[in-house]
Image (cartoon, helix red, strand yellow):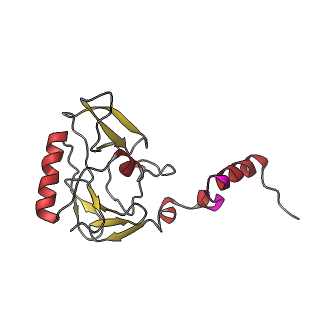
Amino acid sequence: MTQRIKPSLYKLCCRLLVAGVSCLTLAMPAAAQDAGRFYPRDHIVLDLTLGLEWLRCSAGQQWDGETCIGSAYRLTFAQAEDAIVQANDQIGPGWRFPTRAELSSLICKDCAPPKINGLMFPGTLSEAYWTGQTPLFLPRNRWTVNFFTGHSYARFFADQPMALRLVRVRGTQ
């Protein structure tokens, strides 16, 4: 006896295939979906899709070889800029704020909060993280990406404390 696929699931799969997404991807856990994209290397995660290197831990945390330990800092934008200078002095050049698109690319829509691959980025806070971008019509605000909701927002002022994850172009050392 042949089993029939429910019409609604069939329509969804057809739409996804047209968009370039396999129906099998829907059934895979987030870590499996990211398997070809991320490659962990100690305290850094290589993003093979975007050609970037991410720090595995949020600013304030430290990689102990297995996970991120300590508490993530919540920094104002100016404090975050200072943290980037320190990171470049202490762990090598090229570290910067991610763009909104770069940071949003880490969002795992199917994950429970925090909406990120927890194997690659353990200890991520379920809250907003800074990007380096200013909204066009809100020059006093900054874009953030929220790992609780999975959305980006332009409503935060530079003097409000947010979490920070640093990135650099792959090979910048």
Screen quadrant of the C terminus: bottom left
Screen quadrant of the N terminus: bottom right
Q: Is residue 52 left or right of residue 83?
A: right
Q: In the rendered image of this protein, does residue 161 appear above or below residue 29?
A: above
Q: In the rendered image of this protein, does residue 147 appear above or below residue 49?
A: above
- Which quarter of the figure has residue 149? top left
x%, y% of residue 95? Answer: 22, 57
Residue 56 visible here: no
Q: Is residue 165 magenta?
A: no
Question: What residue lies at 46% left-to-right and 49% top-to-bottom?
Answer: 112
Q: Is residue 9 left or right of residue 33?
A: right
Q: Residue furthest front?
A: 136
How many marks overall? 0
Question: What residue lies at 23% left-to-right and 50% top-to-bottom?
Answer: 72
Question: What residue lies at 42% left-to-right and 52% top-to-bottom?
Answer: 105
Magenta part of the chain: 18-24
- Which quarter of the figure has residue 150? top left
